Amino acid sequence: MVILRSEAYTSEAGRDNGIVSILKNKENESQYKVQRQEDGTWVIVLEALNHQEIARSCSLSTEAEARELLPGARAIARESLQQIKSA
């Protein structure tokens, strides 16, 4: 499942740097913001340490759905799934 996407890089070097930044920060929950968009949908936004947006999720209907994509929520879901599989 694709959770984050990153678009609009104007150069290959910028894109490559963005990919490195995403991989470095993707599990750091403090680098995320949950945002409501003008159309009422919700996204999570991953920011680099300089607060520049480096990736965002697709639009979701509710804030709760967006929050389920945060690293901590995904870790809890993975752990629950593993417990079910091992039971």
Image (cartoon, rainbow, N blue to C red):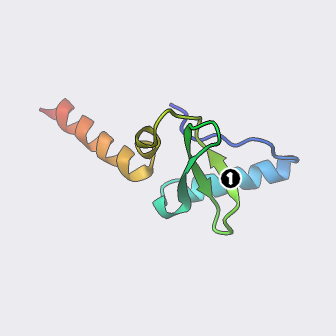
Amino acid under disc 1? Ile
Residue 74, position in %: x, y? Answer: 38, 44
The image quarter in which residue 7 lies: top right
Mark 1, other Cα within 10 Å: few <14 / some 14–19 / many ≥20: many
Q: Residue furthest right?
A: 11
Quadrant including the C terminus: top left
User: In the depicted view, which residue is nearer to us: 60 or 57?
Assistant: 60
Q: Is residue 27 above or below residue 4?
A: below
Q: Answer with left or right where residue 50 lies relative to residue 66.
A: right
Residue 72, position in %: x, y? Answer: 37, 52
Per the image, label 1 sits on a secondary structure element best described as strand
Point 26% across, 43% down: residue: 79
Q: Answer with left or right where residue 79 lies relative to residue 45.
A: left
Badge 1 is on which residue? Answer: 54
Point 18% across, 38% down: residue: 83
Point 45% across, 49% down: residue: 70
Q: Residue furthest left?
A: 87
